[in-house]
């Protein structure tokens, strides 16, 4: 019905950059918020950043000033530009979006993309 597909993860050295993408597809009428979460081994999933359709942005304190979230409403796609990456940013990054569809509303999650920051 609705799919979120992430891309852009990989291995990067400390101080490097990566750009994640999340493309939503399906019977989508509206996506109020698109968010990026991450889960490191042995830790709980945490919110990294979110952006509303109007452009209101929220960042976790640990990434503020280093990560930038953006979205293209016409393409139902969100991006996460990650700069000055640190080893503690290593995690599986998930895209999330509460989506209004032609048949109702649902909370959609992507399959996750692994980001590894290591020298």
Image: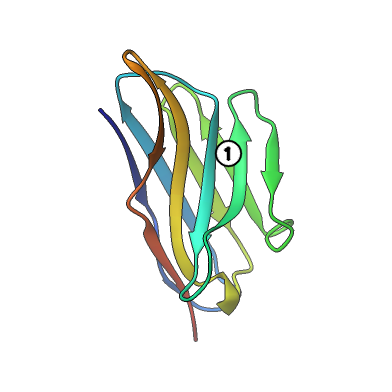
Neighbours of disc 1 within 10 Å: few (<14), some (14-19), many (20+): many
Horizontal placement of 97 versus 83: left or right?
A: left
Determine whether 60 is above or below 43 in the image. above
**Residue at the outermost bottom position:** 119
Counting from the top left corner in percent of width and height, residue 83 is at 61, 62
The residue located at (61%, 48%) in the rendering is 49
Determine whether 71 is above or below 32 in the image. below
Is 45 in front, or is 14? 45
Is 95 in front, or is 78? 95
Is 31 in front, or is 7? 31
Counting from the top left corner in percent of width and height, residue 21 is at 43, 46
The residue located at (59%, 52%) in the rendering is 47
Q: How many marks?
A: 1
The residue located at (47%, 35%) in the rendering is 97
Counting from the top left corner in percent of width and height, residue 106 is at 40, 29
Secondary element under disc 1, as helix, strand or loop, is strand
**Residue at the outermost left position:** 1
**What coloring was used for the rendering?**
rainbow
Determine whether 47 is above or below 43 in the image. above
Quarter of the picture containing the N terminus is top left
Horizontal placement of 40 versus 110: left or right?
A: right
**Which residue is disc 1 drawn over?**
70
The picture quadrant where one finds residue 108 is top left
Counting from the top left corner in percent of width and height, residue 14 is at 57, 78
């Amino acid at each position: 019905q609705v799919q979120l597909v992430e891309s852009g993860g990989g291995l990067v050295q400390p101080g490097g950059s990566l750009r994640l993408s999340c493309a939503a597809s399906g019977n989508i009428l509206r996506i109020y918020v698109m968010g990026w979460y991450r889960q490191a081994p042995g830790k709980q999933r945490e919110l990294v950043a979110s952006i509303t359709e109007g452009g209101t942005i929220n960042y976790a304190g640990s990434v503020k000033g280093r990560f930038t979230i953006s979205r293209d409403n016409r393409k139902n796609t969100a991006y996460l530009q990650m700069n000055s990456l640190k080893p503690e940013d290593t995690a599986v990054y998930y895209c999330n979006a509460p989506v209004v569809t032609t048949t109702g509303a649902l909370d959609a999650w992507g399959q996750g993309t692994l980001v590894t920051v290591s020298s």
